[in-house]
Amino acid sequence: MGGTAIVLGGQPGAGLSPSRGHAAAVTGPSDATGEAAALYLNSCASCHGQQGEGTAVGPSLVGVGAASVDFYLRTGRMPLGAPGQQPVRQDPAFNEAQIAALVDYVASFGQGPPIPVVRGGGDVGRGFELYNANCAACHAATGAGNAVGGGFAAVGLGKATPQEIAEAVEIGPGVMPPFELSDEDRSSLIAYIEYLRAAPSPGGAPIGGTGPVAEGFVAVVIGLTGLVLIARFAGSRRVREDAVPVDAARDPDA
Ligand code: HEC
Ligand code: HEC
């Protein structure tokens, strides 16, 4: 369980304003949890509730797990600037110590997926198969990203670190579905995405060089899979978002 080894920089109160590049690491202050709680109350509670129970403008964080909190904070998607905004990738608002403290604090609201282990040395060939079967429909064969419909964009994969890729695959942010992968497959996927970034291939990654029929077939399969995934996950996400106000205010059966 988290919560035992919070590392937070500075004196009490010093961590309250988001600051970056501040690498102080004071281990084991007795009020570390208090500082994490203050950070949370200042930056998150207005939308997610004092105990992460959720509000009309932010989903519950109970049970989202360390993987989700780490991903949203590292990629700067949280804290959201204002209710109603779409989360986008940007520079993180917090330093490493603050992110670690917030991750432990929010993860303590309820059990959820831990930060996935990232090992090096994946198999690029296997990663190619996994990527084209599961990711290319939304992120494009090149990893450049795409509009996925309904006003959502699957961002390009040029910036995410291996840890962020592993977390995204685990949690499925936004309309992206979560994927259950073995450690080996996850490493292979990461290796292939890193290969794509390095590949000087503006026309797209090779699909296997087996000719137009096979490539057309691959496109159809990927396209259909993508549509099914988008329909399923856009639908289920909407149900989840609706769940907050319904629980809080209007019970249709009442
Ligand atoms: C202005 C409102 C707002 C603020 C402030 C805010 N959030 Fe959020 N948060 C949201 C909304 C809305 C979503 C849902 C975004 C989506 O799925 O498109 C969200 C999603 C999340 C998720 C993903 C939940 C899941 O289901 O996996 C995490 C984790 C999260 N926020 C953490 C935080 C943390 C930590 C802070 C403080 C540093 C914070 N948020 C501040 C509105 C907010
Ligand atoms: C149904 C479409 C869809 C599929 C399939 C999909 N994604 Fe995503 N992905 C998205 C969307 C949309 C986002 C942006 C979510 C947000 O910002 O809330 C995203 C975000 C990401 C990010 C974060 C990028 C960043 O820079 O912050 C990574 C990494 C990622 N996806 C990797 C993958 C991988 C790897 C796969 C295959 C295993 C995959 N995705 C499959 C739609 C998809």
Image (spheres, helix red, strand yellow):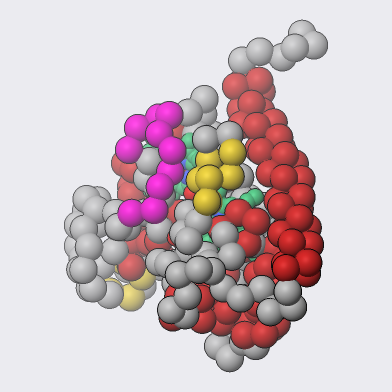
| Left or right of residue 122: residue 252 | right
Q: Is residue 47 above or below residue 127?
A: above
- Residue drawn 74% across and 61% down? 216
Percent position (x, y) of residue 212?
Answer: 72, 68
Residue 179: image x %, image y %? Answer: 70, 62
In the figure, 232 relative to 250: above or below?
Answer: below
Let me know if residue 238 appears in the view. yes
Residue shown at the point (29%, 64%) measured from the top left: 95
Q: Nearer the viewer, residue 134 or 80?
A: 134
Q: Please name the residue shown 76% across and 55% down the image.
A: 220
Does residue 65 show up? no
Is 63 or 20 nearer to us in this picture?
20
Ligand 2 picture quarter: bottom right
The N terminus - image quarter: bottom right
The C terminus - image quarter:
top right
Span colored in magenta: 81-90
